[in-house]
Amino acid sequence: QEKTTITGTVISAEDQMMIPGVSIMEKGTSNGTSTDFDGNYTITVAPGATLEFSYIGFISQSIAIDGKTKIDVSLQTDTQQLDEVIVVGYGVQKKELVTGANQQITGESIAKQNTLNAMQALQGQTAGAQISSTSGQPGEAMKVIIRGVGTIGDATPLYIVDGVQTGDISYLNSSDIESISVLKDAASAAIYGSQAANGVILVTTKSGKKGKARITFDSYYGIQTLAKEIDLLNAKEYMTILNEAYINSGQTLAMSQEEVDQLGEGTNWLDHMIDTAIMSNYSLGISGGSETSSYSSSLSYLSQEGIVSGGDLSNYDRYNFRFNSDHKLLDGRVKFGENLSFAWINKQGISVGNQYSNGLRSAFNTSPMVPFYDANGNYYNTISDSDPWIAGMANPYAYMVYTNQNHNDNQRLLGNVWAEIEIIDNLKYRTSLGLDYNSFSSRTLTPIYSLSTYAYNNQSTVTQSEGKRYSTLIDNLLTYTFDIDDKHNFETMVGTSYYHYNGSSAYGKNVDLIYDDLEHAWLDNATNTDGALMDIQGSPENENKRLSYFGRLNYNFDGKYMFSATFRADESSQFAEGNRWGYFPSVSAGWIITRENFMTSSDNWLDYLKIRASWGQVGNQNAGAFQYLTPVTYSNTNYIFGEDEGVLTPGAYPLRLANPLIKWETSEQLDFGFDARLLNNKLNVAFDWYQKTTKDWLILPSVLATAGANPAWENGGNVKNTGVELSLTYRDFIGDDFSYSVSLNGAYNKNTVNSINTDDGIIHGETGRLWDNSPEFNRVENGHPVGYFWGYQVAGVFQNQDEVDAYGAQPDAEPGDFKYVDLNGDGTIDENDKSQIGNPNPDVTYGFAISLEYKGFDFFVQTNGVLGNQIVQSYRNQANVYNNNTTQILDRWHGEGTSNSIAKVTTDNRNYTEFSDFYVKDGDFLRISTVTLGYDLSRLFKKDNFFADKIRIYGSVQNLFTFTKYTGMDPEVGFTDASDVDGDGYSDYGFSTGVDVGFYPRPRTYMLGLNVSF
Amino acid sequence: ELLTNISNESFYQTQDDAYDALVACYDGMQIATGGVKESFYTASEVGSDDCFGGTGISDGYNYQVIDEFDISRAPSYTDLYNNIWINYYRAIYRCNVLLQKMDQITWDDDNARAQYEAEAKFIRAYSYFDMVRLWGNIPLVTEPTTDNIPQSDPDEVYTVIAEDLLYAAENLPDEVYSSTESGRITRWAAKSMLARVYLYYTGYYSKSDLVGLVSQSDALDHLEDVIASSGHALVSDFGTLWEAADVENYAGENNEEIVFAVKYTYTSNYTGDTDGNLWKVMFGMRGLNQYPYGQGWGVTVNSKLYDLYDSGDSRRWATVISVDDEDLPVDITAQREYTGYYNKKYTPLLTEDGEYPGAAAGGDSDFQLNQMQDYFVIRYADVLLMASELGSTNAQTYFDEVRHRALGNDYTQLTVTQDRIMEERHKEFALEGIRYWDLLRQGVSTAANTIGETTTVYSGGVETTKTIDGAQITATQGLFQIPNTQISLSGGVLQQNTGW
C-alpha cells in the first residue's frame, strides 16, 4: 500500500506559539519524527494510520489521518502531565518518581495574586505551610512556619533562589518567578543539611525558551483601605465610663453629668491614623532563545503605600531588574549561564514592634477628649492642661509623625554564574558561584517637638547608618545517570558547597541640625560638637563559614519502585572545634501501585497511585554567634570618676557564659504519604502524615542569677510536631469553552514540647509586654505547645457580696470584680492557679480556590484560613485609668445581673491588670484573599492576525472579606516579639507569637490590571 | 574569631586589663544599686516608717506590698526584686572573675595589685551587705559558677563581708581622702563600712562581735582612725548637702563630708547604658514640673517625719518637701496615699529653664533616665554618730558636733545616750536608706512597733485609711521577698523567706 506524507505545524493552545521538538509517532509502530525549530513536521505513514503527538508539559493527542495530508495540531498544556518535573535540591526530578513530600507552585499562580511578597501568594495554596503577615505595613516580611514550630529561635525556612541561599524573598518581583517548591519532609530537605530544619523553599526565576522573542507587560493599580474598623469610645462614652470608674472607686464624679451630656464625639484617633493608600506595579519582560542560547529579562517597578498614615510615613518602592540566560557550546557538551536579579528598595515605615514601639497602639489609648489641633492649627500640646484625662496625653498621630521620620535604601544583588560540562554521556560536572549582596543605608530624623509632659524632644536628632552584608556560595556537583537493562534506573549525584557570610555596618547619631526635615537628615547637617551627645558605632557582621559535602542516589525499578537516599556533612564555624561537623542522612521509598498488572481492574477510575515513605534528619544552627567563647565586652560598661558629670571611664567584663559543647539542633522526621490521580486525571490527591521531632533544641535558657552573666545558647530539650496534610484538586471542562478547577488543601498539626533541660523546665516569657508592668503571660514548658498562654481562668463576675463571701478565695473582691478559678483549690488565688489558657499555634491551616474560564473570561477566588489558635488582644495600657477603651467596655458589669463576662471599671484597673482568659480570643478565620475577574481582549481580534497574543484586563479585590469572630482589625497576627535582650542578634523570645497590641492590619485592595503579551 | 570583643582567654593579662576589669566592678555596683526602680534604696525607704508606697492611683499595688510587707496586697507581684537580685550577682560575678585572675595578671607594681584587689573586695562586700540585709538568706558565691547554689547561713556571708572589708581597710592607701580621685573607694570608706556592718550584724542577730573577726573596740578603732586621719569633715550647713534644698549653695557631690558614694551620671539610655540613678524618679511628685522640682512617680513621705523635727532644725526643710509650706500645685487625684509630703533629699530636679538637668547636660530627654544624683552611702556625720554609739571617749563631742551643725542658733546641748543617738540618726539620715536598718538592728519587735500604724491618707483625692500591720514585719522578720523567678529557676533549691 502506498504510504502518505503528512505535514503540519504544532502550536501551543495557550499562547499560539510554535512548539519545537514535539514527538510525532505513528501509532503501533516505531516510526516517528519530531517538530523542527518552527514547529513544523513531515512524516510518512501508512494510510489509515493514527498519529500520536506528545510533548513534555502538554496533553498528548491522537489523530487519525483520515485521508488528510496536512494536520495542524494545537496542544493543550497539562500541568498534571506524567513527565512533569519539579525542582528539588540541586536539580530537578520527575514528579511521578518523587519519594519525598514537597509541593511546587507555579509562578503563574503566584503572579496572579498581585502580592508584594511572593510568599503571601502562597497562603492557602500550600498544605502544611503556615504563612502570616508580620505586619500589614508594605515590605514587612512574611512569617513562614513549615509543619509546626520546631525551634524557639528563628523558625524561618531556608530560601534558595536559583541555587543561592538567602533569608527572605520579599525583594523578588512575583512575575519573575517560574516556580516555588516547598520541601517539607526531611528526605526532601536533608540535601541542605544543617540549614533545613525549618523546611526549604526553592525559588526558580524564569528562563528563556527556544522560539521567537516574547514580550510581556503587566501592570496594576490599586486602592487600599482599612478592611475592618474597631470602635473606640467617643468623648461622651469615655467620660461616662471614667465617671463610673471614679464612683466605683469611691471618688466623686470626674465631670458632672450635665457636662458629659453635652459632649460629642471628641477625637476619633484611629480615623486620623488610617488613610486610603495607593498600590501600583509595572513589569516588562522579554524572553526568547535560539537553538544554542536562551534569555529572559525583566524590569519592574512596584509601589505600595501603607494605610496607616496613607503613604506619608509608610511607603515602599521597589525597582527590580533581572537577567537570566544560558548557552550551549561544543554541541551541547558545555553549557553556561547566569541568573542575576537586582532589587532597589526605598522604604519608610512606622514602628510596628511591641507595645513600646508601635505607631498605631497609642491611638487606642489616647483619650478622645484631647483635641487634634490647637487654636493656631498646630498639633495640640497638652502640656498646660490640668484635666487628668488630657494631661500627659500626646496626640498619637503627631507623635507618630515626629518619631517615625525615616528613610531606608536597600540594594540587593542576588544570582549566580554557572557552567556545566558533560564529560562523557550522562556524566555531568556543574560548578556555580552564587552571590547574595545587600547594601543598606538608613536615616532618621527626630525634630524638636512638644506634645505633652512625657512626649517631647528638645534637640533635633539625626541618625545615619550604612552597611553591607554579603554571602558567597560555591557549589560543585557531579551527576551521573545510568540504567541497567532499561529497568534499573540510577541517578547519582555528589557535591560540595562552600558558604561564607560577612558584612559590616556603621552608625552615627548627632544633634542640633541646621535643617529640621528628613530630606536634610544627614550627619553633616548636625552642628553639635560635644562628643557626649553623639553616638558612633561600627562593627562587622558575625562572620559565618560552612563547608559541606553531600550526595544523593535515586533508584527506580521500571518506573514502579523508587528508592532514594541522601547524605550531607556540614562543617560550620558556628561551633567549637570538635562540634563543627554535622551529619544529615535521609532515605525514602515509593511504589507506584497503578503500574502493577493487578491494578488494571481499577483503570477506569484510578489513574495513578503512588505511596511513599521517608525518614531523615536535618539541622538548625540558628543560635547566637561564638557561643563557645566568652567575649569580653567594653560596651555599656563604664563608671564616672572625678568631678565632671558625663565623663566616663570605660571598663570591661565577660559578657556571658560560654558553651563549648554547643552543636547542631537536629530535626528528625518521618513521613508517610500518597499521591493519586483519579477519574481520568481530573482529581488530584496528595496526602501526608508526618512526625517531626526536634532534638538538641537550641535554646537560650533562663539561668540562675548566681551565675552572674548572661547565658549561652545550649542544646536543651525537644519538641514534637505531628500532623496530616491533604491537597485535593479537581479540574474539568464542560463543552469546549468552559473549564474549571477547584482545589482544597488543609493541614492539621499538633505541637508539644517534650522536655526542657532547665531546673524548672520552663523558658519564661517576658513581662511588661501587654501593658506597662504586665505579668509573664506566655512560656515554653514541657507538655504544652510552644509559647502557650499562661494565666488565670475567669469564672465570671461576682454579682453581689454574698457571692464573694461564699467563694472565699478572693476575700478582698467586690461585686463586679472578676472571679478567678481556684484551680488547685487551696482557697487563695495565686500563681499556682495559672494554667494554659490559650495556644497561639493553629491546629489547622487551610485554603481553597476556585478558578473558571469561559471564552476569554477568567474568574478566580483564593481563600485561606486557620482554626484552633488563640490571640492575646491587649490594646489598652492598663497602667493608666485615663486610657481609652474599645466599645467592648460598654458591656461591663455595672450592677447585679448586668454582665458576667466583663468586670466593672475602677480607677486602679484592678480587674484588668492580671492576665486572664479575658484577654484570650479565638483566632479562627477564613479570609477571601483574592477575587479576580478578567477578560482577554485579544479574543475579539483573534482572527485578524492581531499583534498581541493576549491583552487581558482584570479587576481584583484582595482581602475582600474575613469570616472571623476575632474582634481586632485583623486576625492574621504574625507578629513575633523579637526582643533581643542579650544583643546577640537573635530573638530571645521567638516563641512569643499571637499577640495583638495594636497590629497593623492588612488592607483591603481594589485593583485594576492589564496583562499584555506578544 | 571575635573582631570587636576580646575573648576571655586573651584578657586579664596586663595591669591595664585589670584596671578595666575593676572599672567594670564599679559599673556593676552602679547598675545594681541605681539601675532599677525597685532598688535597695527604695525598699529601705518604702519599708521604713518614713515613706508610704504612694505612686499612681491606677498603678499596681506593688509599692503597697513593699510598704506593708504583705504579698496579699498584690499577689501577682512575686518578683519585686528580681532585677536587683540579678544585678547584684552580676556585680559580684565581675568582682569574682577579677579576683580569680589576680595571679595570671602581669603587674607593673604590687601596690596596684593590692589596691585593685581591695577595691574589688570592697564592692563585693558592699553588694553582699545590701543583699544579706534585704533577704537574709542568700546563696554565697565567691568564685564564678553556674551551679545551683543553696542559701547560706548568714554568718558565712558576713564572714566574707568582714574579711573583704578588713582586707580593703588594710590595703588601700593610708592617705587623706582628697589624695584619691573622687569616686574611688578609700581606706576610710572600708573602715566606716566595717563599723556599719558591725552595728547591723550585732544588732539584728544579737551577737557580741562580727563573726569573730571584728570586736566592738576594733570597729571603734577603725572609726577613730577615720576621724583622725581621713581628712573628712562636716560641711558647715546641712542644707547645702542636698541640691533641691539649696540650689544656690549646693556643696556638690564630692564635698568633704562624703566618705563613700555610689556615683551616677546622666548618660543612661534605653540601649544598654545604665549610669544613672533610676530609683530617684520614684520619689518625685507626680506630674509636677516646677523649679527646682522635676516630676516623678510619687512615693509619699509620712507626715510623722515632718513632725519629728523641731521647727528650728535645718534638717526639716532640707529633708522633706511640704506641699503646703511651699505652695506646690500637686494634682492629688492622680496620687495614691497622698500625705502632703515628699522626699527632698532625693527628688528629681528641674533647671530654671524648665529642663531636666540630665537632658540639659546632654543626656537622654527621658526624665526617668537622666537622673545623675549620686547616692551618699556614708557621710562623715554617720562616722561621728557611729563612733559615739560604739562608746568613743569623745562620744559627747561627736554627738554635739552633728547636732550643732543641724540646729545652729537653736542648739542646746543634750547628754548623749543610746536612745538620743538613735533619734538623732533618724533626723540626720532620714530618706538616706539608713533608717529602716537602724530600726531593724534594734530588734524586729522595735521595727514592727515603730513602722506599724493606722493613719489617714488621700488616694485619688479620697480620704482613705492606711494600715501597716506590724505583725507582718514580725512574720517576715523584716526581710524582703526572694524573687519567685529565682526560686522557680532553682527548681526549689532556693526557699522563700518566711512570711512571703
Image: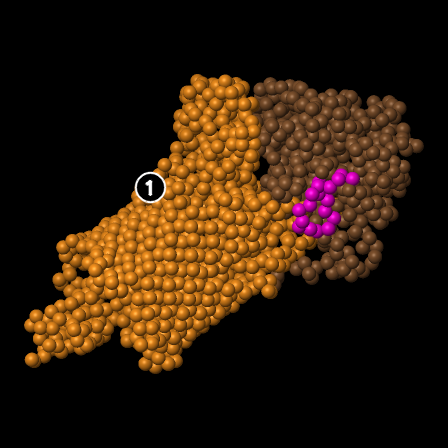
Chain colours: A orange, B brown
Compared with A71, A868 (above or below) is above
B140 falls in the magenta region? yes
Asked which quadrant contains residue B289, the reply is top right
Residue tagged 1: A962
The image quadrant where one finds the C terminus of chain A is bottom left
Query: In the picture provided, is A380 more to the left or to the right than A629?
Result: left
| Residue A183 at x, y percent in the picture | 39, 59
| Residue A101 at x, y percent in the picture | 37, 58
Q: Who's the residue at 81% across and 55% down the image?
A: B112
Query: In the picture provided, is A170 more to the left or to the right than B463?
Result: left
The residue stretch that appears in magenta: B138-155
Q: Who's the residue at 11% across and 73% down the image?
A: A49
Q: Is residue B22 visible?
A: yes
| Residue A910 at x, y percent in the picture | 53, 28
**Closer-to-camera residue (A225/A473):** A473
Badge 1 amino acid: Thr
**Closer-to-camera residue (A165/A126):** A126
